[in-house]
Amino acid sequence: MEHLHAPWRIEYILGPKLPKGADSVFKTIADSSEDEANLVLLRGRTCYALLNNYPYNGGHLMVVPYRQIAGFEELTDAEMLELMQMARRCMGALRATMRADGFNVGLNLGRVAGAGIEEHLHLHVVPRWNGDTNFMPVIGSTTVLPQALREVAAALRAKLAEAA
């Protein structure tokens, strides 16, 4: 079995958690107009896309419904469609700006499935490249992100706006 090491995520793991029943960080971002500060890339009618603050790989982003729901079966047809369409658009932008060779796309539903923010469903889109595993994650237990999050966000926003 291979292991994915993401030591920068410890900041999130050890950080303060919201009390039960509080709005999730995704709901707070959805209601905010601070898109650049929150690394929001794209807003639609029912969903929005943003870069992950604690990425597994450069360009790791998430597509999130505005509505705070935990279960996949709770998505409306409109939310489901836009979630997938927005993920597809973002993958196109990642291919164009970062030359991604492939993607891991998925949902972690429930704490036992690995959801860090289990109260608000979100779709992960993680770009991958041929040969993107080298000695750093294997020996150094760390991954090198070749570009700052704000730079990635600006490039992706520009590409998504161009395609609109």
Image (cartoon, helix red, strand yellow):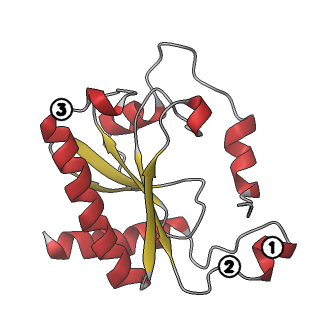
- The answer to whether the residue labelled 2 contacts the one labelled 1, judged by CB atoms less than 8 Å apart, is yes
- Residue 138 marker: 1
Q: Which quadrant is home to the N terminus?
A: bottom right
Compared with residue 60, is residue 38 higher up or lower down, i.e. above or below? above
- Give the residue at x 55% y 70%: 58
- Give the residue at x 39% y 39%: 29
| Label 2 Cα neighbours within 10 Å, binned few <14 / some 14-19 / many ≥20 | few
- The residue to which callout 3 is attached is 76
Residue 41 vs residue 140: left or right? left
Q: Is residue 123 visible?
A: yes
Question: For the residue labelled by badge 1, is the local secondary structure a helix, a strand or a loop?
Answer: helix
Quadrant location of residue 89?
bottom left
Residue 162 vs residue 100: left or right? left
Q: Is residue 37 visible?
A: no
Q: Position of residue 118 (x, y in %)?
A: 50, 30
Inter-mark Cα distance, 2 to 3 = 38 Å
Compared with residue 163, is residue 80 higher up or lower down, i.e. above or below? above
Q: Earlier in the sequence, mark 2 or mark 1?
A: 2
Question: For the residue labelled by badge 2, is the local secondary structure a helix, a strand or a loop?
Answer: loop
Question: For the residue labelled by badge 3, is the local secondary structure a helix, a strand or a loop?
Answer: loop
- The residue to which callout 2 is attached is 133
Q: Nearer the viewer, residue 50 or 81?
A: 81
Q: Earlier in the sequence, mark 3 or mark 1?
A: 3
Q: Position of residue 91 (x, y in %)?
A: 33, 70
Inter-mark Cα distance, 3 to 1 = 41 Å
Q: Earlier in the sequence, mark 2 or mark 3?
A: 3
Q: Position of residue 35 (x, y in %)?
A: 35, 51
Considering every residue shown, the one lying at the far front of the view is: 1
User: At label 2, which amino acid type do we have?
Assistant: Thr
- Residue 29 marker: none
User: At label 1, which amino acid type do we have?
Assistant: Val
- Give the residue at x 32% y 37%: 30
